[in-house]
Image (cartoon, rainbow, N blue to C red):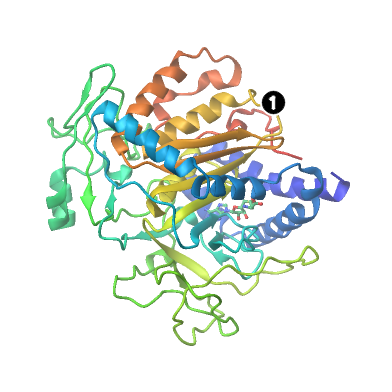
Amino acid sequence: MNAEGKRLAHIVKRTHKRLRRKYKEERDEQTIWTEHITREEELQCYSNSMVTLATQHWPSQQVMSQVDWCYQAVCQYYQGDRLSQANEKEARKMSHLNLSPLYTSPQRPSTILQVLDVGSCYNPFSNYPDWCVTAIDLYPANKSVKKGDFLNITITEPHNKHLYYIDPENISTVTPEDGEKKMGSEFENVKKMGIGFEDEKKMGSGFEDGKKMGGGFEDGKKMGGGFEDGEKMEYKIVENSVIPTEPNIRSVLPTKQNIASEIPTKTEQPSVLPTKTEQPSELPTTTEGPSVLPTKTEQPSELPTTIEGPSVLPTKTEQPSELPTCQEIRTLPGSFYDVVIFSLLLEYLPSPSQRLACCRNAYRVLKPGGILALITPDSKHQNANAHVYKLWRLSLSYLGFSRVKYQKCAHFHGLVFRKALCFEACLHDAARLMQDVKGVQVKGKFARIDYDKVKYEMYIPQDFNEDESDSEKE
Ligand SMILES: C[S@@+](CC[C@H](N)C(=O)[O-])C[C@H]1O[C@@H](n2cnc3c(N)ncnc32)[C@H](O)[C@@H]1O
């Protein structure tokens, strides 16, 4: 990479490092994040650098870009054999464990794919004609990207009546009694499920002693999904309903803007408001979609009858010099997307629990059988950080994801996880994976990993670098 490319890469990595350093020093992720997202100048500088770096400096040195990798992986899943293979594999697993699916097997979508690109920056996936991309970023580099913080997004109820929703966050933080008080009749549908583990320890009702389960971090924050192998637990399946938890309450405090956000009802009109200059683009295949609020500078003129289709990729010569007039997104529909993409997103987030909170939100917006494509930078040898990515698989199993694909490319790892049809089967996987990772003798920097936190946290190799000479690609 030439000197200009290195300078831009330095600007991008400088932000990541500053946030991680601050988190290491202060440990107060909420305050750090709330303060960070108001640093307009730094966000703008990052955004400008990132788009130029990615569009003008990386392509020349890459065999396959992260964008191409994601696209191919998604095509393999939806157009190739991967979807039916994953369905079959899961069916076999359920039959072996004598479990039933919560969702019916997804079929290949006959319409275009609904794709959510989180941390999109410049909307690199916008020119794939068979994708309808919702691109969001803290600081969009062009108008086709909506401004939004995925850590602070409100996720609305699934529109499809046949969808069940498990909220892993509520596994350990709501007692049935609390639930009844909070949710009323929705909790009438709660089913109790016990899970037999290979070691024959049973995970049954966790409320016998009247205490809330799991959860406690050293700092006293409540955590979701806390259950040890063989520990007793209970989770809830609420038919037709998302349990409306405050989004990421333990990782990021809601901003004032969030409080103002509205959850659209089923009868509401399509929820994207165009800017004055914008014309609704292509005809959608559905009227559902993310709810977008105009920024202060925009005045919504009239309600469109369509949601926005893919928009135009900026040309290589484009230099976004200032924040474009972009729309702001505060709510996203639950169980709506076929694909969620986190391309080089997780490294931006300073705390391991914020990274997992993002994955939890991805789970909530994905359709059953939908996939989360993760790209994480690493130019080192495949095995150098392999242990960390094993832990990703484990953390994501606890959320209800199963792995579909993994590949180490020259400068990144590419991973695809699917929102599994059977949550319990994922917990079985998690128990097995936990035994595997604990059984491995890890030396060096990864030896200090606390496996009890892997259910709530997602590490990246840079978390363990004392000197922050990180492995991100130059
Ligand atoms: C390294 S860039 C990746 C850009 C693009 N996805 C790519 O692959 O080239 C990371 C982006 O994530 C965005 N981001 C970080 N945290 C975010 C959040 N909580 N919500 C939305 N965007 C976020 C940043 O603003 C930044 O533009």
Q: In which quarter of the image is residue 446?
A: top right
Which residue occupies the foreground of this view, 274 or 39?
274
Coordinates of residue 443 in the picture (x, y in percent): 58, 14
Q: Answer yes or no: is residue 435 visible.
A: yes
Q: Residue at x 47, y 49 (%)?
A: 30
Q: Is residue 414 left or right of residue 364?
A: right
Coordinates of residue 312 in the picture (x, y in percent): 66, 69
Q: Residue furthest bottom?
A: 301
Q: Which amino acid does label 1 sit on?
A: His
Q: Residue at x 34, y 70 (%)?
A: 264
Q: Is residue 147 left or right of residue 263?
A: right
Tag 1: Cα neighbours inside 10 Å, few (<14), some, or many (≥20)?
Answer: few
**Residue to which mark 1 is pinned:** 381
Quarter of the image that includes the C terminus: top right
Say above or below: 110 vs 64: below
Coordinates of residue 428 in the picture (x, y in percent): 33, 27
Which residue occupies the foreground of this view, 435 or 23?
435
Q: What element carries label 1?
A: loop
Coordinates of residue 235 in the picture (x, y in percent): 23, 39
Quarter of the image that includes the N terminus: top right
